[in-house]
Image (cartoon, helix red, strand yellow):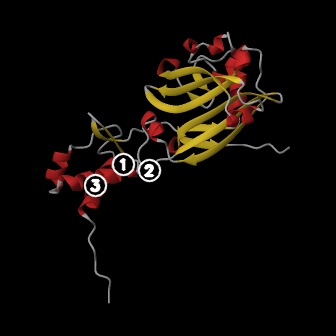
């Protein structure tokens, strides 16, 4: 016997039409969707059906919902290219003094549009962090919690640790100097340390509740967490854990085996 046709549930029909409007630009990026009451009237459905449709679109990353604002089409965000050559470019910028137009070598950003939330702490190294540094647990570190923003939109979270005996009493240890043109590469260079190598290990996972809130991550979107070790010669001078929305990162690494 032929399989009987089962019509799609009502909320899917609503979601399909809203998705079509978003993808066609009828509802442009950043624009509010019609209110629940308006959608109920337009599609002749109950409020619960509208909410199911919006939940589906949120799970697909097409819309965001904020208390007090409503549901809106997800704004188009720049995808940041993280390539292995960016540290070489940053070092070239630092040496040449060309640090006025960007905060990283892979994303051109006017400094007026760049800001961050910051929290500096002096802490003893945990066993895990000490192992990454190659130091004894309990060694004192400067731990910097940073939330980077471009045009007010959150871009990246990081916890960056520096050896306290290397930075204590220097401008690098003063949070008032952040954001620092040229970032970590420039900071170390100002102390007489030229970066000679960087090791990065990325992994993907669902965001924690704090990460999802801070980075405004839609439901269904993962984060990429990059563990970074920065070297000067054989010595690890910085360890960082960097968190970014996975849908806004393009990882591009070149390994030279010559």
Residue 123, percent across and down? Answer: 63, 23
The residue sitting at the front extreme is 138
- Residue 193, quarter of picture: top right
In the displayed structure, would residue 19 be above or below residue 149? below
Image point (68%, 10%), residue name? 170
- Determine whether label 1 and label 3 are within 8 Å by CB: no
Q: Which residue is mark 2?
A: 220
- Determine whether label 2 and label 3 are within 8 Å by CB: no
Separation of residues labelled 2 and 1 (CA atoms): 8 Å
Quadrant of image for the C terminus: top right
Residue density around tag 1, few if under 14, some if 14–19, many if 20 or more, within 10 Å: many
Image point (30%, 57%), residue name? 16
- Determine whether label 2 and label 1 are within 8 Å by CB: yes
Side (left or right) of 39 relative to 103:
left
Residue sitting nearer the eye, 172 or 141: 141
Q: Which residue is mark 3?
A: 52
Q: Along the polypeptide, which appears first: circle 2 or circle 1?
A: 1
Residue sitting nearer the eye, 251 or 169: 169
Image point (69%, 39%), residue name? 200
* One can see residue 130 in this view: yes
Image point (59%, 30%), residue name? 159
Residue 221, percent across and down? Answer: 47, 47
Side (left or right) of 69 relative to 112:
left
In the displayed structure, would residue 83 be above or below residue 231? below
Q: Which residue is mark 1?
A: 58
Q: Secondary structure at mark 3?
A: helix
């Amino acid at each position: 016997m032929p399989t009987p046709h089962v019509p799609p549930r009502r909320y899917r029909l609503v979601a399909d039409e809203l998705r079509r409007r978003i993808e066609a630009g009828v509802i442009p990026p950043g624009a509010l969707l019609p209110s629940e009451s308006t959608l109920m009237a337009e599609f002749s459905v109950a409020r619960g059906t509208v909410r199911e449709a919006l939940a589906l679109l949120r799970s697909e990353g097409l819309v965001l919902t904020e208390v007090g604002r409503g549901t809106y089409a997800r704004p188009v965000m720049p995808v940041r290219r993280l390539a292995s050559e960016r540290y070489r470019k940053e070092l070239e910028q630092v040496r040449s003094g060309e640090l006025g137009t960007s905060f990283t070598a892979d994303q051109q950003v006017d400094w007026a549009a760049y800001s961050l939330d910051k929290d500096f702490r002096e802490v003893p190294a945990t066993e895990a962090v000490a192992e990454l540094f190659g130091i004894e647990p309990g060694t004192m570190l400067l731990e910097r919690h940073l939330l980077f923003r471009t045009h007010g939109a959150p871009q990246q979270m990081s916890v960056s640790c520096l050896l306290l005996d290397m930075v204590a009493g220097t401008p690098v240890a003063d949070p008032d100097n952040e954001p620092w043109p040229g970032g970590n590469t420039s900071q170390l260079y100002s102390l007489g340390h030229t970066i000679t190598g960087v090791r990065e290990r990325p992994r993907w996972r669902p965001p924690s509740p704090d990460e999802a809130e801070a980075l405004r991550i839609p439901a269904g979107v993962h984060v990429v967490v990059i563990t970074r070790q920065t070297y000067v010669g054989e010595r690890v001078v910085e360890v960082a854990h960097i968190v970014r929305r996975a849908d806004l990162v393009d990882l591009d690494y070149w390994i030279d085996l010559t």
